[in-house]
Image (cartoon, coloured by chain):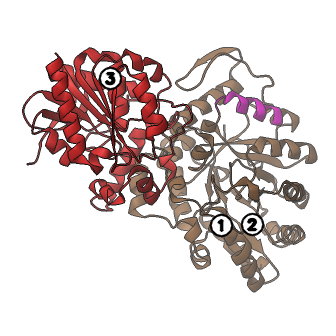
Amino acid sequence: MAPARRELSIRGTLIDLLSDGAGTPLLFLHGAGGGGRWLEFQERLAKIHTVLMPSHPGHGGSPAAEWIEHISDIAFHYLDLLDDQRLPRVHLVGASFGGWIAAEIATMASHRLVSLTLIDPVGIKVDGWIYPFLFGMDIPEVVATVFHNPMAALALAPPDQSAETLALQYRQGTALARVAWNPYLYDPLLRRRLPRIAAPTLLAWGAHDRLAPLRPCGETWAKAIPGAQLSVFDGSGHVPHIEEPEAVAQAVLDFARAAEGRR
Amino acid sequence: MKFYYFHLMPYVMEHDEPSSWVTLSNRFYDPKQGQTLYNQYLDQLEYAESLGWDGLCVNEHHQNCYGTMPSPNVMAAMLVRRTSRAKIAILGNGLPLRENPLRIAEEIAMLDVASGGRVISGFVRGISAEYFSTGINPTHSRERFYEAAELILRAWTEPGPFPFDGKYYRYHYVNPWPRPLQRPHPPVWCPSQGSSETVEWASKRRFPYLMVFTPIKRIAQIYGEYREACQRHGYTASRYQLTVNVPIVVAENDAKAETLARKHTMWVFNTGLRMHPPFWRPPGYMTESSLRRILQNPPPLPSELTFEQADREGYIVYGSPTTVRDKLRVFADELKAGIVCSGMNGGSHEASLEMMQLFAEEVMPHFREDAEVDETAGVGR
């Protein structure tokens, strides 16, 4: 089943939004290169929830937004989306770069989150770790850094090498670099704000993540967010929702159901 | 036509690393060898003045073997005290690469005062790889460039102190001592690869446009766009606003020049500009429309440029004095470039000096109808 595609204007900023399913709302924030890619993971979540997947400005089908200069701009952009869609509370799931945005949102407004799932998030400075610089890598190096099983990278492979595709990739890289080039992949203010997160939080981590390794990154997040549960996926690198979609989706669904029961 | 001697100050070496930029380990750099090279290169620049060159050019690049001048102002300072007549063109300082661009206003003013007003100040963004070696966000490059340029120009021309509250640069007191000697300020040049945004920006301000290592057809096209833009801004471009940087090899005959060009000039492209592909295209360094223009007609990577193509398309000028004269006629008479900047590499220091002498004696005098003209009068400011 193909998800529904809608174009929204949120305070004048256009969002290309994919959505599918029924049930309690779940906002999924994709990682770099994941814009507009509705994969098995999202399909599985949509069997239980109304899944909303916006493309970040400049990613997928969402045009670049010049006003976005900081990661918190994107976080506020999605709080505006929730207001616009009259969604007082949602399950929030973010992967990698999307996990960073989700964590920013959670530090601002965790009362609006029924549950929070961060899948191999970046976004904080971790003692003893410097994220490998993906911007300086060619495609094979990026794949080797991000994926445990390189074949899984095919899910994000560009459809062709047309000018249109190359321009999109450049636009996505530019949108990412605007907020993540330096400091690279983190907001110096985020880590000290993580204890503010009051929503039940699941940290889903690929055991073989080479971009943000379980140790020290996952362990640092687990310590910083009160009561966070850390689940490790043995067959995955940095993107377990793509590498092990069934297992990760099930973990998210179980965690979300438990969080709903707690209300 | 005016002749400027352009030195990259390369650390010439052969290596099998994937990139001559950013990641080429500095363990390959031997400071003792560097000492010899720096001094030979400065000797060559000083010699150029004594042979009649009108200007001496230095420029800024970081973390590579292609050009070992991370601070061109340092080299310019050495030249100021060892020369007395030639212009000293710093082509340029990478404005967005500085956290405090007021330092550029100060350093250029120092050089201008000490040299008695011989300085030309190039404003550049720095090439793509520079954003990897400095950490500056390439998506800010263009905005930082325009903002830093405005700051520097105001610092040179407005009596201080005044406050400056930009997006990237903020000061409560802009009041540099010294002020530059040239009025209203040293000429500003824009070395560039021909982006339409830069053509527009430079032409509006009468800043000379320098095409670096570009095929002749493209130079003609960009010069055309620049002249047209000048007309749109209500004036006709002086020929000294149209400048070019092209490597020249001159020898007693064509065959010998070709041998030298194949070996030494092509090193600049094939090895000096060998770059790990991601370093060519940092995100946001160019606009999406510039990217689309490039994708329509992608230029060859310098590392893949063959001698034959470089020769055919006019990336380089080589030959006997007669041949080089004929080739430079194309620049002087067809492109109507007012200034040719070029470096010369004979393969050794002594051979380079000999080549310079041959050029100065056998080629340069044939282009001296404008010997009495000051190429900086009324341009670049």
The residue beneath circle 1 is: B271
Q: Are marks 2 and 3 in contact (CB under 8 Å)?
A: no
Residue A116 locus on image (x, y percent) = 27, 26
The residue beneath circle 2 is: B13
Q: What's drawn in magenta, residue-wise?
A: B99-111
Colour of chain A, in one word, is red
Colour of chain B, in one word, is brown
Q: Amino acid at mark 2?
A: Met
Residue B105 located within the stretch drawn in magenta: yes
Q: Chain of mark 2?
A: B
Q: Are marks 3 and 1 on the same chain?
A: no
Mark 2 vs mark 3, CA separation in Å? 51 Å
Q: Amino acid at mark 3?
A: Ile
Mark 2 vs mark 1, CA separation in Å? 8 Å
Quadrant in which the N terminus of chain B appears: bottom right
Residue A213 locus on image (x, y percent) = 45, 41
Is residue A87 visible in the rendered image? The answer is: no
Q: Chain of mark 3?
A: A
User: Is B118 positioned to the left or the right of A245 in the image?
Assistant: right
Is residue B261 visible in the rendered image? The answer is: yes
User: Is A201 positioned to the left or the right of A3 in the image?
Assistant: right
The residue beneath circle 3 is: A105
Residue nearest the observer in this picture, A224 or A32:
A224
Q: Quadrant of residue A229?
A: top left
Q: Are marks 2 and 1 in contact (CB under 8 Å)?
A: yes
Q: Quadrant of residue A204?
A: top left
Residue nearest the observer in this picture, A82 or A121:
A121
Quadrant in which the C terminus of chain B appears: top right
User: Is B288 positioned to the left or the right of A160 in the image?
Assistant: right
